[in-house]
Amino acid sequence: MSRAPTLLFMSALDDPAEWVPALQRAWPELKVRVWPDAGHPDDVDFALVWKPEPGALRTFRNLRLIINLGAGIDAIAADETLPEGIPIVRLADEGQAEMMSGYVLLAVLRYHRNLHRFEEAKRAHRWTYIHPKPHAHTRVGLMGLGYLGAHAAQSLAAQGFRVSGWSRNPKTLPGIETFAGPDQRQAFLAQTDILVALLPATPDTHRLIDREALYALPRGASFVNVGRGSTVDEPALLAALRDGQIAEATLDVFEREPLPPEHPFWDMPQVTITPHLASVAVPETAARQIVANCRRALSGEAPDYAVDRRRGY
Ligand code: NDP
């Protein structure tokens, strides 16, 4: 190639002042352009994008690789105008996985150590002793054992929790009891005290966590959703929370984001809400993977962590 390889950065959420230097440290010859200053469209080889406007990538005729600036590809998969035949990869970023596992650990430990009860007791000026239990007494189940899910499962297992996981295809993960497919969903849920959902938004996962799933959990189970809001039947979750079937929930993702101010979740003391930030891509760690994939694309090799747009993840 006679000109410098060129990457277009296109994200309204991520700061180019952090990303551009990180990418250039990983590949000094790489020219990085920041949307909307794309330069000549035919010079763009790679697009690093988060939730691009539908149709925004259509003009780049020489694209070799589309890199989704995150793990979930639902926004990009929905763009019917995306050029066909160009591989799409997602980030599989160690920094992002660590951040996600940190959030999951925090939420699980908070319930396991009854911190939410002590927060409530403090508000009432009430000294409330609840005898602590060893980690091994709490069974944590992860729905979704992908790049982030498996990392979170292993972080929980390293803390001594009894960890199981459920995925589409059978898996083997050291120290984790695994279940797969619709036939094993009930058995997986029946032995889960704290359910952590880390599923992608796909046509198959839409409202997968429905009334039947919530009531398959032991009564009084806790629920943490850090995957996607669309994977949960929210009216069913609301009913299960009101009824005590689900004792408490930590929700980072919702069917509608931002969560509308009138949504009943806001007024439920047993629901903790965070605004979709359980984990974000980390430029220092992600840049190396991005650059390695760009180099592979240039030399005609298949990229790592390619996603299947039709499957949705
Ligand atoms: P992966 O794509 O690596 O893994 C997805 C997992 O879900 C796999 O284990 C897959 O099963 C499983 N799965 C998919 N469809 C089904 C189904 N129909 N039934 C059962 N299991 C299914 O994703 P990651 O682990 O990297 O990330 C998970 C999701 O987390 C992302 O898609 C994204 O939406 C969300 N996310 C949220 C963030 C936040 O801040 N809240 C930040 C980053 C990501 P199998 O292994 O058998 O294919």
Image: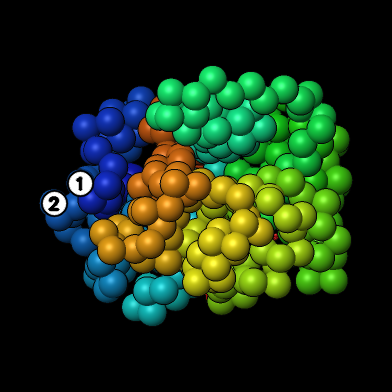
Q: Position of residue 64 (x, y in %)?
A: 42, 59
Q: Is residue 82 left or right of residue 132?
A: left
Q: Find residue 34 and name its label.
A: 1
Q: Position of residue 124 (x, y in %)?
A: 43, 29
Q: Position of residue 241 (x, y in %)?
A: 56, 59
Colour basis? rainbow
Of 210 and 55, nearer the camera is 210
The answer to whether marks 1 and 2 mark residues whose Cβ atoms lie closer than 8 Å is: yes
Q: Secondary structure at mark 2?
A: loop
Q: Is residue 200 left or right of residue 11?
A: right
Look at the numbered disc 2 and say if its residue's Cβ is closer than 8 Å to ligand 1: no
Which residue does the image show at 66% across and 59% down from the upper left? Answer: 245
Tell which residue pokes out farthest to the bottom in this image: 80
Q: CA distance from mark 1 to mark 2?
A: 6 Å
Specify the quarter for ligand 1.
bottom right
Quarter of the rendering occupied by the C terminus: bottom right
